[in-house]
Image: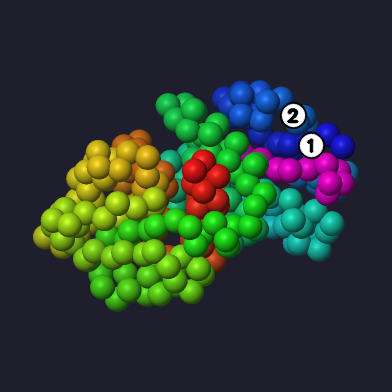
């Protein structure tokens, strides 16, 4: 049976990127079906669908009908179908809310990062392997000046199977003895006003193929937008939600090990 991607989108630019993903990344080996509403998802069988893409840039996306849809979705035969929301960098602070409601993942969308979006969406669609196994094959470096949070994060990553985790408690410490890793989690603001953006640029130079995720305790949408525009792969707000963080990292790890 032909694979189907369902989409509920009003943004024509995102739709064009979705079509580009199907043609260039998936080799045209699936069909696109437009939905008039989320309720229409129930008309398709589980074996036909590989992804449902929803326009998270819509201001009215989070409403009673969306919540009701996910309540029914959890009880339906489609409960294992990934559902991804496309959000803009300005809406970074809504990411946790989307996951808590029931979305499987979210992808940052903007015109100037279309190629990155296409690649990330293609990776999400192709991610069929054991995520836990992949998680144990990658290295992660955490750079944060809060030792309690940093050590806790390392423990959690270890528990979920990622054993190669290094920690650094300051920018200076990291630059003195930089750790090369597949994934970097770096704080936005360090003590004495040191900006994480300088560290972002430094890591981009020494490890250009790595995945960089910035984290911050300040609910600053402009900072999140700047992080994405400067090349960060994602931006997470503290306190970190491990139910969101771990699956995201596992999917990133699966993509990294697949490329290797």
Q: Residue 94: x and y, percent?
A: 50, 52
Q: Nearer the viewer, residue 164 or 190?
A: 164
Residue 86 on the magenta span: no
Q: Residue furthest front?
A: 260
Please report the residue visible at 21 percent of the width from the left and 54 percent of the height from the top: 178
For label 2, the crowd category at 10 Å Cα-Cα, with few meaning under 14, some 14 to 19 and many 20 or more, is few
Q: In the figure, is residue 55 to the left or right of 40? A: left
Q: Which element type, helix, strand or loop, lies under badge 1?
A: loop
Q: Are the residues flagged by discs 2 and 1 in contact, CB closer than 8 Å?
A: yes
**Residue 46 among those drawn in magenta:** yes
Q: Residue at x 87, y 37 (%)?
A: 1
**Residue annotated with mark 1:** 3
Evaluate whether residue 226 shows in this view.
no
In the image, 87 versus 160, the foreground residue is 160
In the foreground, 134 or 23: 134
Residue 162: horizontal and vertical position, in percent? 46, 65
Magenta range is 44-55
Name the residue that disc number 2 marks.
Answer: 29
- Residue ID at (65%, 41%): 125
């Amino acid at each position: 049976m032909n694979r189907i991607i369902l989409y509920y989108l009003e943004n024509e630019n995102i739709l064009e990127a979705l079509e580009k993903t199907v043609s260039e990344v998936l080799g045209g080996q699936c069909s696109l079906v437009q939905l008039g509403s989320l309720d229409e998802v129930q008309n398709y069988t589980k074996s036909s669908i590989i992804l449902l893409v929803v326009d998270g840039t819509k201001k009215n996306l989070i409403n009673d009908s969306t919540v009701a849809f996910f309540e029914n979705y959890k009880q339906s035969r489609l409960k294992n179908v990934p559902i991804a929301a496309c959000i803009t960098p300005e809406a970074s602070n809504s990411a946790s809310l989307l996951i808590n409601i029931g979305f499987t993942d979210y992808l940052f969308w903007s015109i100037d990062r279309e190629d990155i979006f296409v690649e990330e969406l293609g990776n999400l669609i192709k991610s069929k392997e054991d995520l836990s196994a992949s998680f144990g094959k990658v290295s992660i470096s955490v750079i944060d000046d809060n030792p309690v949070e940093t050590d806790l994060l390392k423990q959690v990553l270890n528990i979920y199977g990622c054993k190669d985790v290094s920690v650094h408690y300051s920018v200076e410490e990291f630059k003195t003895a930089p750790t090369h890793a597949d994934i970097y989690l770096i704080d936005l603001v360090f003590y004495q006003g040191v900006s994480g953006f300088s560290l972002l640029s430094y890591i981009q130079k020494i490890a250009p193929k790595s995945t960089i995720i910035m984290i911050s305790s300040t609910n600053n949408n402009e900072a999140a937008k700047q992080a994405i525009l400067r090349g960060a792969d994602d931006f997470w707000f503290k306190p970190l939600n491990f139910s969101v963080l771990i699956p995201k990292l596992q999917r990133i790890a699966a993509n990294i090990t697949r490329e290797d």
